[in-house]
Image (spheres, rainbow, N blue to C red):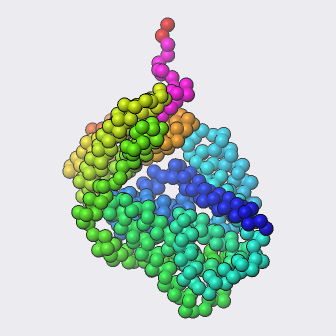
Amino acid sequence: MDLTIFLLNLAGAVFLLLYSTRMVRTGVERALGANLRKVFMATRRSTVLNAFAGMMSAAMLQSSTAVMLLVSGFTAAGVMGVTGALAMVLGADLGTAIAVTFLSLDLSWLIPLLLVGGGVLFLKLEARIAKQAGRIMFGIAFILISLRMIGEATAPLRDSAGLMAVVDYLASDPLTAFIGGAAITFAFHSSVAAVLMFATFCAQGMLPLEAGLPLVLGANAGGGLIGLWLTRNLHIRARRVALGNLTIRLAGALVALLALARFALPVELPGAAPARQLVSFHLLFNAALVVVWLPLMVPLASLTKRLMPDTAAAAAALSRRMPALDRNVLGTPGLALASATRELLHMGEQVEAMLTPVMTYFVSTSEVPAERIAEMEQQVDTAQDDIKLYLAEMNQGELSPEQAGRSIELASVAIGMERIGDIITKDLMRLAADTRKRRLAFSAEGWNELNAIHTRVLANMQLAMNVLVSEDVTSAAQLVREKETIRRMEQDSHDRHLARLARAAPESIATSNIHLDVLRALKEINSRLIYIAYPLLKRHGMLRESRLEKVS
């Protein structure tokens, strides 16, 4: 077989696998991301519930790294402890193993059904949940197709003498296989994709179990390295979560590797075929980690604190993040606008990190990290000033009308993001502090209404950032439609609140002003996000000048 054709087929299959797993994760995050955050916060008082929530979330997201990044944000904001976050990530590792077990089954019969169902939901329906459900179905179908492609691409190699020599070496040197598995997983940035690929090689008869097991253990350790790398610039509490997760994975993998080297393999592992045994081993390994480490979350959190102490140097290092505003490209407006967009995206991530946990501050029994929120707001204010000054410098050169218009749009978005930061700190945080100080509690109905709107606004923030970067007209139109959705939800909550007041519900009476102020704040935040879509839709002639009917 021609080497070039083989490498091209294998690379195409691998990249389709990577894209597919990301596609499923994106669909779940867009459809359920805000609800997942709500579940995380609801279970944060029990390590067992933490682990279960992490397991279920990762099984849907097909990524324990995604779960770790979500809970790390809560930990950085101070509304979740390192102990609870570590328990969630521990459960998430088991969740990804469950996802691998499911995807490794012979589901070829399901591919046409997933493609048809995904096509109908994604291409024919307008509802956000339906579209994302279609995206998820497409992603799962593509994963199954990519695994079949990997098998077909590698089938001619089963009788290759060179391959057999490499495989025999890996089987005789578990440490090299372990390191190789970790490196492949880190390069893929997905332990799910790596383990599925190893299982496919095993099913093709290319990879014996003796070499496959160390590769899988390396994949587990590599997954921990991914988290540590992705959180390297985050708050120290987030980095402690990543360090704890790496400690769990690496320690467990090394112990299992030593056991494999010292003791003979059992005659029968769960599952008959070698590929099934490999996947079952991966599942049992992660289940064992949960059983062993879950009772040790408190000492593990203490260990991460000793290894990563709070120091002025660490805080200063975080504050010295290199901005994306490259003044070397100010003379090239296209590149300068791209730099400003990247910095604005980071600004949006900071605002999202402030908004995500804000509702928990109304019910939290621990001290609200006001200093941390104030620090984040200061970073947002600084980013706004930097972006405006950068764009002003760029405008001194020669710009096309389109570039000048885009510059104004980006500056306006920066101002809007800064205003959202002000709303969070000066309005919502003040209202939360007042609620705590007066020891007030919302009615169950009112609290659910506020959380539903907050969840929707968070989802709209993610959509707004996607529109900012992609300038996708369809997504922009979907974002603008959300304005009416939020307006309707706000009006319904307002009317229901007045009805509860009429019934003299004591909780509603005590929290009436706070409830209405939170509604107004969330509605204004959403309006600032919707603005991001207006210029794009206006350029495409999809925006009306007024909602008023013409008066004759």
Examine the rendered structure and indicate whether residue 145 appears above or below residue 124.
below
Considering depth in this image, is 103 or 244 the residue closer to the camera?
244
- Determine which quarter of the picture holds residue 431: top left
Whether the magenta-drawn stretch holds residue 359 is answered as no
150 lies above or below 486? below
Q: Quadrant of residue 158?
A: bottom right
Residue beneath the point at 67% across and 84% down: 168
Left or right: residue 393 compared with residue 179: left
Single out the residue that lies furthest toward the left.
437
Residue 119 seen in the current view: yes
Question: Which residue is pictured at 50% across the width and 79% down the height?
Answer: 253
Q: Position of residue 215 (x, y in %)?
A: 58, 77
Question: Residue 426 lies in what quarter of the image?
Answer: top left
Relative vertical location of residue 542 with respect to residue 116 in this rendering, above or below: above
Q: Is residue 22 left or right of residue 382?
A: right
**Number of numbered discs:** 0
Residue 72 lies, in percent from the top left, at: 39, 61
In the image, the segment drawn in magenta is 530-550
Foreground of the two, 474 or 52: 474
Image quarter in which the N terminus is found? bottom right
**Residue 136: image location, x then y, percent:** 61, 53
Is residue 542 a member of the stretch shown in magenta?
Answer: yes
**Looking at the picture, how far across and down is residue 514, in whole percent?**
28, 41
Q: Could you say which is closer to the camera, residue 327 or residue 33? A: 327
What residue is rendered at 77% in x and 65% in y? 2
Q: Report if residue 271 is visible in the image.
A: no
**Which residue of the protein is positioned furthest toward the bottom in this rendering?**
263
Would you say 188 lies left or right of 292 here? right
Residue at 60% in and 38% down: 126
